Image (cartoon, grey):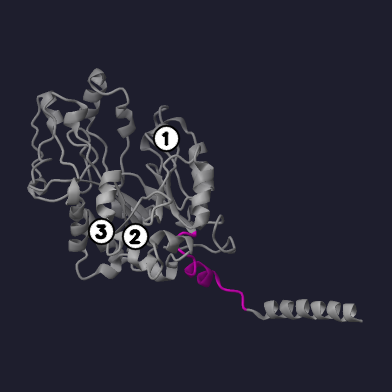
Amino acid sequence: MRKLTLILLVFLTLLFNQACEEDLPIPSCEESIQGLHLNEYKILGSHNSYRLKTPDVIMELMRSQSQLLPEWFDPGAWDYSHESIRDQLENYGIRSLELDVYRDPEGGLFYNRMAYALLGMDVASYEPALKESGLKVLHFPDLDFMTHYLTFKDALRDIKSWSSANPNHLPITILVEAKEDSPDLIVPGMGLTSTIPFRLDAVEEIEDEISEVFDGDMDHIIRPDDVRKAFPSLRVAVMCNAWPTIEESRGKLIFVLMASEVVRFNYVKDHPSLWGRNMFVFAEEWQDEAAFIKIDEPIGNFNEIRDYVNQGFIVRTQADANTVEARFGNFYRRDRAMESGAQIICTDYYLPDPRSTYSPEWSNYFVDFESGRIALVNHLNAPSIDDQCEIGE
């Protein structure tokens, strides 16, 4: 009798639960999407987003004088260009940008492009902004300096302006690389520029310029404090899925510092778990400040990326590198990046290289999401959402 009663209770419980589930309203696509956390969807990013192609005369100089360059130095890796950042945001759905910044505390360090001296040409840039003090945006001094923005503050102002005019956009992640490449060290004795390292507290220059541009509007930025909240560390917070939701994050920007271990240490010290800081950092998984992890190569590190995503971290990887995929039409690295679960997939080719229409040296390789979507639900770690639900803006 007791056994029969128990079976009847189990049956009634299952029946009751099923009835309750049937009565629960099914969330709309909009509700489902708005509730996604920042680590539960995937976006496309551009690599060296500010960059314009190296001047042809300098490219030819490097190729003709390759014996002067280190063996690892391949000028062909620089043979690409980007649309304006506004176009990337507006027309190509890019939601992660990368800005390389060099120190220029006195101004004028990059006013002359010294590679032109090797060609007997005028070295002056005639750009007044390059005489001003402050961080400059470029890829490599003297040789690869063409850029949509000369100064970091100009780039930030333009991104901020676009963001303010499009207040419902998905949060834009801005990777800020503290660059220290010095042409004079790589090709010594040629009179090329010697850059200034980010020693000691010099990384504060990046922090200060962000604060200056966003003065009075810091709510425009998602900062580490907004994620960590009352958790004992930023790492614990993200492993407990404390990332803000899309609904809480639309119209905002996220800054992530890319830097050497020494520069990163100087940025984090005295700011445990990045307390009070404007930027996240690319960290190691075990560090208290870990939230974003950079793993450029997604093929050999495929399982590692998936493990970090499942733990709650946001991983940035690269679908292509050094123009290789675009030249040979190899989509395998791109596909593995897509399948890895990495939330930020960077590329130099959100549209095919224009030379692919007439040159056999270039393929129609490019990176986008299915059906031209701006973002995809990350099925590796996100709640189950109907595939018909699209993440907009």
Residue 247 % position (x, y): 43, 70
Q: Count neighbours of disc 3 (C-alpha within 10 A) and say few if under 14, some if 14 to 19, many if 20 or more.
A: few
Majority SS type along the magenta span: loop
Q: Amino acid at mark 2?
A: Ser
Magenta residues span: 25-40
Q: Residue sitting at 40 percent across and 48 percent down?
A: 284
- Does 80 sit above or below residue 384? above
Work out which quarter of the rendered image holds the N terminus and state it: bottom right
The residue where tag 2 is placed is: 273
**Quarter of image, res 24:** bottom right
Q: Tell me the CA gap for discs 3 and 1.
A: 44 Å
- Circle 1 SS class: helix
Q: Name which residue type carries label 1.
A: Ala
Q: Say which residue label 3 marks.
A: 270
Question: Sequence order check: which comes first, mark 1 or mark 2?
Answer: 2
Q: Are marks 2 and 3 in contact (CB under 8 Å)?
A: no
324 relative to 306 in the view: left or right = left
Q: In which quadrant is the C terminus drawn?
A: bottom left
